[in-house]
Image (cartoon, helix red, strand yellow):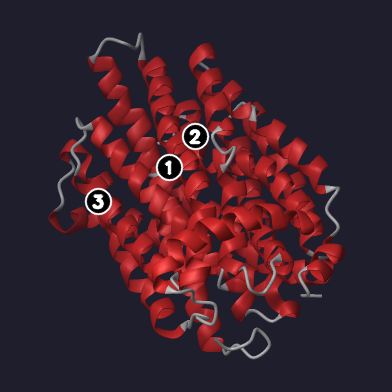
Amino acid sequence: MPSPATADRRTVWSWCLYDFANSPFTTLVVTFVYASYFANTMAADHYKGLGLAADVKAAEALGTGLWATGVLITAFVVAGLAPLMGTLADRGGFRKLFLLGSTGVAVAGSLALFLVQPDKVYLALAAFVVANIAFEMGMVFYNAFLPDIAPPDKIGRISGYGWGLGYGGGLLALVVVIILPAIAWFGIARNSGEHVRASNLLVAIWFVVFSIPIFLWVREDKSRISRKGAIVAEGYRQLRETFVEVRKYRQIVRFLLARLVYNDGLVTIFAFGGIYAAGTFDFTVQDLLVFGVVLNVTAGLGAAAMGVLDDRLGGKKTIAISICGLMVATLIAVLAPSRPLFWIAGILIGIFSGPNQSASRSLMGRFVPPDKENEFFGFFAFSGKATAFLGPLLLKVVTEQTGSQRLGVSIVMIFFVAGLLLLRWVDEDEGKRAAARS
């Protein structure tokens, strides 16, 4: 693999295109289209059919809780798998192979979501969980390429370009979903929600086509490959050593602890933003699509613009600015009496969510030792999922107990405030010196 200082443009843009390839999954499946359809239609109808819901709002609240269960399962599995799989990828030279496998499973899961009928609620949830786990695991191996391909003085903007391009992918996918119903999705019917489920078919095709460049033109450093017969055993041994060694990198520990908390708020927003818009402000599927377009435009512009700011101010300050913006947006969303104010909240979430994710990835890239990218990005994924069940769990409990999605969403503020306070203890300069990337 070329050194970060000499990485060519084709390598960088091939890497960035993977963000473009996988973003429709988070945009159409996790956030705007399928999540809302599942919670407010599939699961709500299921609970109404069983006589467990007194009215529509109660059924939607139960549907929201069921979707939260799927998000919780994903969080637990990824938190458990990511560090070990990252270690195996480092020691076995399997980064690209594991990325390919994760991509294939995510694509297959997306196809399953198109095929599963609305009355098969738990089968659909299982397909989502499998696809979502594969998607999240793929991000471990994808993110680990960043320190290898990005020069140290440009790691923030390259990470930002990736996130910006990713939001562009989500935006274009949303536009396609908005346009194609006018031509009946090439003959796909509207009965049984098939026209909504067809968005998952688009996700699968998009994922396959635009992920090709990373497998063709981004090379993997295989200099640390272990003996084939001892890879798994050495992986466990190395993982144990890393748990001890990571203490030497105290700024990584501090940063991952802060991210453990503030990312919970972001995960909850992404998982339930569309559900909240539909349940509280009566957004239709078309409304959600337009809402998604606006959020993707603002998030893409925010990630690209603040990626340059990241290289100038540093990742820590960029993250802090983004968290403050997200806190303001969340407060507006919870208190908004009408759609116009909710739209303002959504735009602010878009502007600051992209930079938050991009700067978090670039800051980790600055802190990671050069010979442990997959391994430490496995812990990065762990920090994003280890307690990611808390946000959805609290939202689920509060929403179900009070019957109010507003009160459920309000818990997000707790995570942003606590994460911002913990971030204060991170010393970015010391972290770079410890990783020999200053």
- How crowded is the residue under tag 3: few (<14 C-alpha within 10 Å), some, or many (20+)? many
Q: Earlier in the sequence, mark 3 or mark 2?
A: 3
Which residue position is annotated with label 3? 198
Observer able to see residue 331: no
Q: Nearer the viewer, residue 275 or 395?
A: 395
Instruction: Decide which of 171, 95 is in the foreground and name it.
Output: 95
Asked if residue 205 lies left or right of residue 232, the reply is left
Q: If you read the primary sequence from the N terminus, does the residue marked by circle 2 or circle 1 appear first? A: 2
Q: Position of residue 405 (x, y in %)?
A: 53, 23
* Disc 1 secondary structure class: helix
Q: Position of residue 246 (x, y in %)?
A: 71, 56
Between the residue at mark 1 and the residue at mark 3, the CA separation in whole angstroms equals: 17 Å
Secondary structure, mark 2, is helix
Residue at image position (55%, 44%) is 385
Does residue 284 sit above or below 201 in this rendering?
above
Residue at image mark 1: 287
SS for dot 3? helix
| Mark 1 closeness class: few <14, some 14–19, many ≥20 residues within 10 Å | some
Residue 359's quadrant in the figure? Answer: bottom right
The CA distance from mark 3 to mark 2 is 21 Å
Q: Along the horizontal axis of the image, is 437 left or right of 46? A: right
